[in-house]
């Protein structure tokens, strides 16, 4: 009986761990509606990245550090991956697991980027890494990689004047 | 606090500097750069061409790689119609070792490039054109020996899957020029790898 319960618990745990690895796959309209225009007291840091983008992967720990540092405050990091959707299972999910990413990750699967790049910001060339920082009343866009101090100074400024 | 504002202003100034480069209608400078076969190739080398398809691309960026076969096909299709492809690597190999000249030579062989693939030492040409990502296309027409920028942007609207392309922006732009019309759209954007340069 005990073994059966143990097996049941193990299977449930296993199922949960599989579930936990899933991340949302959204097209741009869904991303825009659900994540890029929230009218709350939170400061959102939206980082556009991909597993194949070296400078993006290099700066990821800085975003993770922001998530950790501000976990009790109204600051939220969202990592929007631009990996090819066909690499979702084979590359993206294993990457998230291996790096043990704590920030929320979303896969943006919308190849028609000419239609939506300007909607994120008209100054964006389309190159990554790129980061959008917004709160209820202000919005800034950066097409550049960040070190932690730069990122932290922006978040501090935003949380102060919010 | 003051320092923070100063820092943020510095970012903004950085943005303005990055944002420079050609716009549609500008006259583009000619170039003379080393090809993967060791010979120099100039924008004036194609005497009978009506224009040039300048593609800033590189060895390893997944988007650049995804488009390599398509760029080869474009060259084969449009070279004889007067619009040959010239590819230029805009990355600094000191920042991105995978984009060294030797590795360009290897990549061009491996992928059977039918077009010149040029090394741009010091990124002079790439920076003047304003290439921000790879691949990044500048379609030029020849007008009285001047090179005029006619279209800037993406090759098409689906980098991940050539079979799902609905808008072949670059082909449409070349066809418009061949018909004596102006490309519409003349400017598009696409997600790509940022060019690798010293900060």
Image (tube, rainbow, N blue to C red):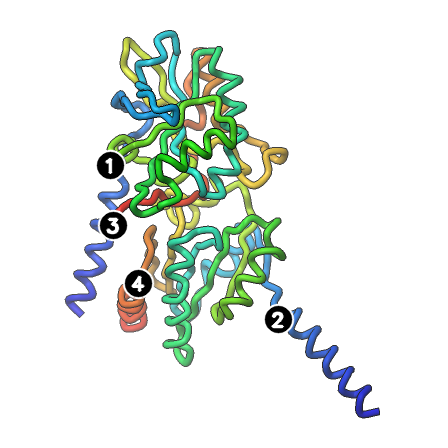
Residue extending furthest left?
A: B2
Q: CA distance from mark 3 to mark 4?
A: 13 Å
Mark 3 highlights which residue? B199
State the residue at coordinates (59%, 60%): A24
Instruction: Mark 2 or mark 4: name the one nearer the start of the chain.
Output: 2
Numbered disc in front, either 3 or 1 = 1
Q: Is B168 placed above or below A141 here?
A: above
Mark 4 highlights which residue? A147
Quarter where residue A92 is shown: bottom right
**Do the dots labelled 1 and 4 sit on one chain?**
no
Mark 2 highlights which residue? A20
Quarter where residue A13 is shown: bottom right
State the residue at coordinates (32%, 18%): B43
Numbered disc in front, either 1 or 4 = 1
**Left or right of B182: which side holds A150?**
left
- Give neighbour class at mark 2: few <14, some 14-19, many 20+ (Cα, 10 Å): few
Which quarter of the rendering shows the N terminus of chain A? bottom right
Which numbered disc covers residue B122? 1
Q: Position of residue B195 (x, y in %)?
A: 35, 42
- Give neighbour class at mark 1: few <14, some 14-19, many 20+ (Cα, 10 Å): few
Residue extending furthest right?
A: A1
Q: Position of residue B73 (x, y in %)?
A: 54, 23
State the residue at coordinates (49%, 71%): A102
Q: Secondary structure at mark 3?
A: loop
Q: Position of residue A44 (x, y in %)?
A: 41, 65
- Give neighbour class at mark 4: few <14, some 14-19, many 20+ (Cα, 10 Å): few
């Amino acid at each position: 009986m005990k073994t059966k319960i143990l097996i049941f618990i193990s299977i449930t745990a296993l199922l949960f761990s599989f579930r936990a690895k899933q991340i949302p796959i959204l097209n741009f309209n869904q991303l825009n509606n659900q994540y890029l225009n929230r009218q709350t007291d939170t400061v959102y840091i939206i980082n556009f990245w991909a597993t194949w983008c070296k400078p993006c992967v290099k700066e990821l720990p800085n975003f993770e550090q922001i998530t950790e540092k501000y976990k009790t405050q109204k600051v939220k990091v969202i990592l929007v991956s631009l990996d090819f959707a066909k690499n979702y299972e084979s590359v993206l999910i294993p990457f998230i697991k291996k790096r043990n990413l704590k920030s929320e990750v979303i896969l943006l699967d919308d190849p028609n980027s000419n239609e939506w790049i300007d909607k994120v910001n008209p100054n964006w060339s389309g190159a990554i890494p790129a980061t959008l920082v917004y709160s209820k009343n202000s919005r800034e866009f950066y097409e550049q990689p960040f070190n932690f101090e730069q990122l932290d100074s922006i978040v501090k400024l935003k949380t102060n004047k919010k | 606090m003051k320092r923070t504002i100063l820092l943020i202003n510095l970012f903004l100034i950085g943005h303005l500097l990055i944002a420079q480069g050609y716009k549609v209608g500008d006259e583009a400078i000619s170039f003379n750069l080393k090809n993967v076969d060791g010979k120099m190739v100039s924008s004036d080398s194609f005497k009978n061409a009506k224009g040039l398809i300048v593609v800033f691309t590189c060895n390893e960026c997944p988007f650049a790689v995804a488009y390599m076969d398509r760029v080869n096909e474009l060259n084969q299709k449009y070279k004889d119609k007067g619009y040959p492809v010239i590819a230029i690597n805009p990355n600094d190999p000191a920042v991105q070792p995978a984009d060294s000249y030797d590795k360009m030579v290897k990549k061009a062989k491996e992928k059977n490039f039918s077009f010149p693939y040029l090394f741009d030492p010091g990124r002079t040409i790439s920076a003047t054109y304003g290439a921000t990502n790879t691949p990044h296309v500048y379609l030029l027409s020849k007008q009285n020996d001047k090179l005029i920028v006619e279209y800037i942007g993406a090759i098409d609207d689906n980098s991940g899957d050539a079979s799902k392309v609905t808008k072949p922006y670059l082909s449409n732009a070349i066809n418009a020029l061949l018909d004596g019309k102006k490309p519409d759209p003349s400017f598009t954007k696409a997600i790509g790898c940022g060019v690798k340069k010293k900060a």
